[in-house]
Amino acid sequence: MKKLLLLLSFTFCIVRLALAQDSCNLRISLLTCAPGEELYSTFGHTAVRVQDEQKGTDYVFNYGTFEFGPDFYTKFIRGQLLYFLSVQEFTDFMYEYQLQSRSIREQVLQLSCAEKRKLYTSLQVNAQEQNRYYRYDFLFDNCTTRAGDIVANNTDSPVVFKNILPENHPTFRNLIHSYLNAGHQYWSKLGIDILLGAKLDRKVTNREAMFLPDYLLKGFDSASVSDHPLVTPSQTILQMPSPLKDKSFFTPGIVFGLLLVIVVGISFAHSGWARATIKVFDFLFFFILGLAGLLLLFMWFGTDHKVCQNNFNLLWALPTNVVMAFFVHNQKQGVKKYFSIVFWLSVVLAFVWFFLPQQMNNALLPVVLLIIYRSWHLSKTKPYAGKSNHP
């Protein structure tokens, strides 16, 4: 009988404590959205949901909003695009993700009533016009990091995160690649690997990995405050079939490999059309390489994207090629010497490809081999001689 009374008394205390914690009628949760098929949604999304039972409101605070204005692309390229915190009805938020066929998982924050009020107030202050805008940084200041930070900054005791990474910590590039590969975004992966430099190859810390929604979910799932779990176990509140498409055959590696084979094959032909084709190809090829090099220099020195600095892709995308492309048919010694330097630089690059401080995209290896092959010809032979080989 005594044991029963003790059990009932203990149960009453637990229920009373739970009711005391929820007396403010606030329920705040973290929403983690699955990846979509568009590049901007490949990595998923995070938002904060606030339900006020007393007022009958159910809002989603979304840090991933931006305006598509006439200067959007200019600001985006220069790293000056402003994102902002928007507030919308939860039903509208759910409807958007239903249309995109993206699932949503929810983790309810287990905070005291005072902590919930403090967090809700911070979200409301952030949503004010003068506070809502911020300079977007994909790795260190995005919609996911903002959601995680505002929760961690409004608890009475520090949030303790357990390790969610393997013993051999991945790099930022490793994490990004895992999502791009899963979404079959191989051309986007190539573009990212070309534009983003060696800073992307630093190993992430446990907290830095939570710039990705799935990793923030894992981090919160095992986090604690004052020796209590920070969140309840995640629950799927919207289950949708994945919108990710099947893998395409024409990946960058295959396309560039075929280009290498075709160019080498045409180079061995001795007909007039073959020589004319190779002449046009050499001009376009080296001119495009030069343009790519100029773009990399601009992204390094002309924008606020710090992750575009220290880019080893400039070893194959030489900006000087944009000028020398106009002289590929010139047989002067200076031109031959230039392409001889390009040849040896590319040979060395091919040998050290896997040992550079920056992880290079292997789909570019056929391009490097093509540079080696054509620059060798341009430095040694006279492929555009006007005289016929026939009597």
Image (cartoon, rainbow, N blue to C red):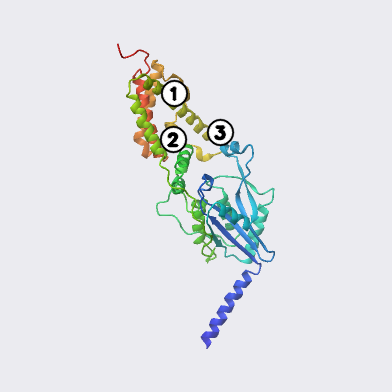
Q: Relative to 98, is 332 on the left or the right?
A: left
Circle 2: element type: helix
Q: Amino acid at mark 1?
A: Phe
The three-letter code of the residue at mark 2 reads Phe
Q: Residue 309 has which mark?
A: none
> Residue 283 — which label?
1
> Can you say whether 152 is above or below 176 in the image?
below
Q: Give the farthest residue toward the top.
A: 391
At mark 3, the secondary structure is loop
Q: Earlier in the sequence, mark 3 or mark 1?
A: 1
In depth, the one of 239 and 29 nearer the eye is 239
Eye-nearest disc, 1 or 2: 1
Left or right position of 290 against 273: right
- Residue 177, position in %: x, y? 44, 46
Q: Amino acid at mark 3?
A: Gly
**Residue under pointer 2:** 312
- Residue 318 in picture, x, y percent from top left: 45, 28
Res. 194 visible in picture: yes
Q: Find the distance from the CA under tag 2 to the CA under tag 3.
A: 17 Å
| Element marked by disc 1 | helix
Q: Is residue 171 above or below residue 4?
A: above
How far apart, in angstroms, are the residues tagged by discs 1 and 2? 23 Å
Disc nearer the start of the sequence (2/3): 3
The mark that comes first in sequence, 1 or 2, is 1
Q: How many marks?
A: 3
Badge 1 vs badge 2, beta-carbon distance below 8 Å: no
In the picture as drawn, the residue positioned furthest to the left comes out as 391
Q: Nearer the viewer, residue 253 or 155?
A: 253
**Considering the image in quadrants, where does the C terminus appear?**
top left
The residue indicated by pointer 3 is 302
